[in-house]
Image: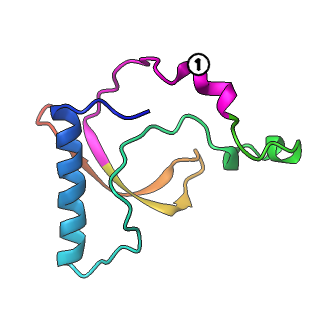
Amino acid sequence: MNPVKDAHLDALARIAEICRETYEKNGIMSADARQFNPHLTLFKLSKAPDLYRKGVRKIEQCWYSKYNDHHFGIENFRSIHLCNMLNEEQDGYYEIFHEEHLFNND
């Protein structure tokens, strides 16, 4: 499923581009050459060891295919987190190095 191409997606893509450019200017090179892919992770098998022990190795397409074109709503956000994806906090969220608020009303 591809995100709707609109001004919001353009803004996210621009933020990703600025981040990548800023990292490069500061000598932080990424081994990840993939194109920016805005997405929302709903479920990670790596966080469900019980399913792994039961033999579930991937989420079968038939389990979610009826929702491919479903509109789940809009998620508003006010800040962006720079996270250490190698270190999780006790609540399961990644360690936050920095939070940048995007609007003045925060």
Which class describes the residues within 10 Å of circle 1: few (<14), some (14-19), or many (20+)? few
Q: Find residue 26 and report its image quarter.
A: bottom left
- Left or right of 18: which side holds 59? right
Q: Would you say residue 67 sits in the magenta stretch?
A: yes
Q: Amino acid at mark 1?
A: Lys
Examine the rendering and report whether any part of residue 106 can be seen. no
Observer-nearest of 9 and 100: 9
- Left or right of 37: which side holds 90? right
Q: Find residue 4 and report its image quarter.
A: top left
Residue at 69 percent across and 38 percent down: it is 59
Observer-nearest of 37 and 16: 37
Check the picture and name the quadrant holding the C terminus.
Answer: top left
Residue at 44 percent across and 19 percent down: it is 72
In this view, 40 is above or below 66: below
In this view, 59 is above or below 74: below
Q: Position of residue 31 (x, y in %)?
A: 41, 74
Q: Please, which residue is most extreme toward the left here?
A: 104
Observer-nearest of 23 and 10: 10
In this view, 102 is above or below 21: above
Q: Position of residue 93 (x, y in %)?
A: 52, 47
Q: Position of residue 18 (x, y in %)?
A: 17, 59
Examine the rendering and report whether any part of residue 77 can be seen. yes
Q: Find residue 75 and report its image quarter.
A: top left
Q: Can you identify the residue that label 1 sits on?
A: 66
Check the picture and name the quadrant holding the N terminus.
Answer: top left
Residue at 20 percent across and 51 percent down: it is 15
Observer-nearest of 24 and 62: 62
Q: Which residues are magenta?
A: 61-80
Residue at 70 percent across and 35 percent down: it is 60
- Left or right of 3: which side holds 13? left
